[in-house]
Amino acid sequence: MMRNIFLGFIRIHILHHANEGEIFGVWIMDELRRHGYSISAGTLYPILHSLEKEGYLKRRDEVVNGKVRKYYRITEKGVNALEEAKPKIKELVEEVI
Amino acid sequence: MMRNIFLGFIRIHILHHANEGEIFGVWIMDELRRHGYSISAGTLYPILHSLEKEGYLKRRDEVVNGKVRKYYRITEKGVNALEEAKPKIKELVEEVI
DNA sequence: CATCATAGTATCGCTTAATGATATTGAAAG
DNA sequence: CTTTCAATATCATTAAGCGATACTATGATG
């Protein structure tokens, strides 16, 4: 029941965090786990790739502690999508809550 | 983007409406369309069946205008699930909005 | 009565998405 | 130049969503 809703939200959450700063795969997984939700790598990475491919996120590779990390940051298009989504989500949620 | 979120919400919306009164398949489809979302019959009916099977909804068949309608109403378990879900949704949404 | 039209529900075959498990990558350490 | 490790990537499987199409009463028509 909640899993379903959470999954619908995951793209928005990713955009949201990528709007506040740079994010990368494992960080997101941890962040979500902290909030009581978890997501498989096999689900997350394809989502990141598609968000990037569709132009909502842009990527930057950096070596951290000798490991390559792919940092993502929101794009202009991503910000727009996020702002457009907010009122719709609000409407969707307020009817029920 | 929004479709995904909407789909995650559909079970909650169904429970919500089944809490306010009796609902049936076509009515839900119309209601959602009115709000700018649409759902295929091939998606909706399996959802109704599973919500019933899992005990969130109970069914009552009635003939209306010479056609059989399956009215659904929320159960005690459904009400509980709905009430439990609300704060979690709120938390999930408020972080982003 | 037979058959027709119709609202509503049900299901099939296909496509797309999520998942856990497993593999790959590349820098650093030794 | 091998090993180790965090992080990312992909594979095979399972589950979910979908449009299209079929099914099921029932009341109307003649």
Image: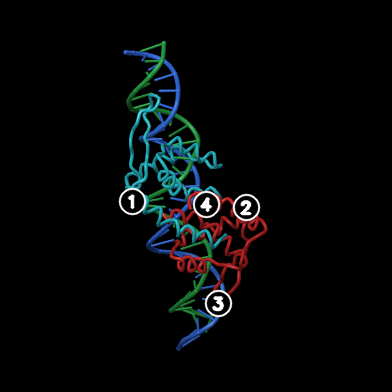
Chain colours: A cyan, B red, C green, D blue
Q: Secondary structure at mark 3?
A: loop
Tags 2 and 4 in contact by the CB under 8 Å rule? no
Looking at the rendered structure, which numbered label has been put on residue B66? 3
Q: Which residue is mark 2?
A: B84
Instruction: Indicate the position of residue A37 as horizontal and vertical percent values.
Output: 53, 42
Q: Which residue is mark 1?
A: A77
Q: Secondary structure at mark 2?
A: helix
C-alpha gap between disc 2 and disc 4: 16 Å
Name above or below for residue C25 compared with residue B96: above
Q: Badge 3: how crowded within 10 Å, few (<14), some, or many (20+)?
A: few
* D8 displayed left or right of A8: left
C-alpha gap between disc 2 and disc 3: 39 Å
Task: Pinpoint the chain carrying mark 4.
Answer: B
- Quadrant containing the C terminus of chain A is bottom right
Looking at the rendered structure, which numbered label has been put on residue B94? 4
- Residues beneath discs 4 and 3 located on the same chain: yes
